[in-house]
Image: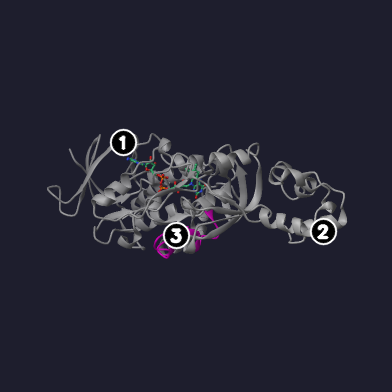
Amino acid sequence: MTQHVDVLVLGAGAAGLMAARTAGRRGRTVLLLDHAEQAGAKILISGGGRCNFTNRDCVAERFFSDNPAFCRSALARYTPADFLAEIEAAGIAWHHKTLGQLFCDGPARQIVDMLLAGCAEAGVSLRLGARVGPVQRGGAHGAGRFLVETDAGAVSATSLVLASGGLSIPKLGATGLAYEVARRMGLALTALRPALVGLRLEAAALARLAGLAGVSLAVEAMAGNGARRRGFREAMLFTHRGLSGPAILQASSCWREGEAIRVNLLPDATPGVLLAAKRARPRAGLARVLGEHMPQRLADAMLPREMASRPVGELRDRQLSDLLAELQAMEFRPDASEGYAKAEVTLGGVDTRALSSRTLEACRVPGLHVVGEAVDVTGWLGGYNFQWAWSSGVAAGMAA
Ligand code: FDA
């Protein structure tokens, strides 16, 4: 028996829940399918369990895409303020953390519950633990309709919303389903790569940084060449395998294999900071002086042994200014990222040039919509990716 619905949504993550709820509220019959046993798995673990659900400063410039203006329309139609209004109406307490990032005060589950309740009220049928098989369009079941095989029988739909996300964290259910279906329907993909991910350093570089794992500090990390080049002022963390922390996760979206990342380890230091210490406290040891501006373990590791214990007053002005310049432009040359197993998102996706920016519908395949992370729109760290999922889900749900 084939089940007939108006809208079939594949993937009950952030974007799929939003698209299904929006279409259901318009009176469409909606079936929302996911192979996972629970909806919104990434929402549940996001933001350390508190979900950084949006960012107040959600401008197109905070997203990477081969088509940078594409995200504007959907983000303008359903804004961070719109999602925040929903959070408040649902009685979910929230707070601003830093850099415009909004988090739940309590568990992220509240957001999943809010979206699931909205779907139920809108009459959306939700099927979890569902296996999705081949997807076709046209043929015997009706011209222009989509036919999707599932382990519980075939489903025929007028609109198909691909909301199955990207490749990041397969353990949480990520697969390439959206990419495969899109490609089979004739849509192009841009290059895919893990992003918002830690970067590994080769053994020789790691040996130099031995003992620093766990050290964290505020830095400015600069990565990428040409138009891709960006600097991020946030915390960086040394790990057993390389570099991580928000500054590096952000930089990973701009970094490409073979390129160096330039890190300013003293972004707030004034040019004369060491010279001023030399004048004021000439007998203080250099390592100690430096340790007042960065974690002591890092200061010790960064100084040549012959300099570390010397009183700052014994060093020439030139030596001190050269040292400062070096610490403000350290080059790290990662040899790989931690990959999809650890990446928060997939950079790249379905090429937006084949999609309507208003409805996320494929221009050449009427009724096919692609939303969320599956699209070539990837946000910075800080709530941008969820806002894209909410906004693109609403845009598709309004039209599907
Ligand atoms: P999402 O991945 O959420 O959902 C896709 C759904 O499709 C899943 O439920 C999956 O099971 C299902 N699916 C996949 N393949 C399928 C198949 N073959 N058959 C059936 N179903 C299938 N962003 C942010 O803005 N703020 C934050 O705090 C965080 N934090 C964060 C932490 C961690 C650890 C990760 C991994 C990611 C984040 N993110 C984030 C990124 C954010 O989670 C991500 O951008 C969105 O979840 C993307 O939403 P989607 O709905 O597009 O995909």
Q: Which quadrant: the N terminus?
A: top left
Q: Residue at x 69, y 44 (%)?
A: 298
**SS assignment at label 3:** loop
* CA–CA distance in space, label 1 to label 2: 66 Å
For badge 1, the amino acid type reads: Ala
**Could you tell me which secondary element the residue under label 1 belongs to?**
loop
Q: Is mark 3 within 8 Å of ligand 1?
A: no
Judged left or right of residue 365, residue 164 is right
Q: Earlier in the sequence, mark 3 or mark 1?
A: 3
Q: Quadrant of ligand 1?
A: top left
Which of the two discs, 2 and 3, labels the residue nearer the N terminus? 3
Depth check, mark 2 against mark 3: the one in front is: 2
Q: Are marks 1 and 2 in contact (CB under 8 Å)?
A: no
Q: Which mark is residue 78?
A: 3
Q: Residue 53's spot in the image, x, y percent?
A: 51, 50
Instruction: Determine contact: label 3, label 1, CB under 8 Å.
Output: no
Mark carried by residue 130: 1
Q: Which residue is mark 2?
A: 276
- Asked if residue 91 shows in the view, the reply is yes
Residue at 32% of width from left, 58% of height from top? Answer: 399
Magenta residue span: 54-72
- Quarter of the rendering containing residue 190: bottom left
The amino acid type of the residue labelled 2 equals: Ala
x and y, in percent, of residue 381 in the image: 52, 51
**Image quarter (top left, top right, bottom left or bottom right) of the C terminus:** bottom left
Residue 149 position in % (x across, y down)? 22, 40
* Three-letter amino acid code of the residue under disc 3: Tyr
Q: Kindly report the distance in space between the C-alpha atoms of the residues bearing marks 2 and 3.
A: 52 Å
Crowd band around label 2 with a 10 angstrom C-alpha radius: few (<14), some (14–19), many (20+): few
Query: Label 1: few (<14), some or many (≥20) within 10 Å?
Result: some
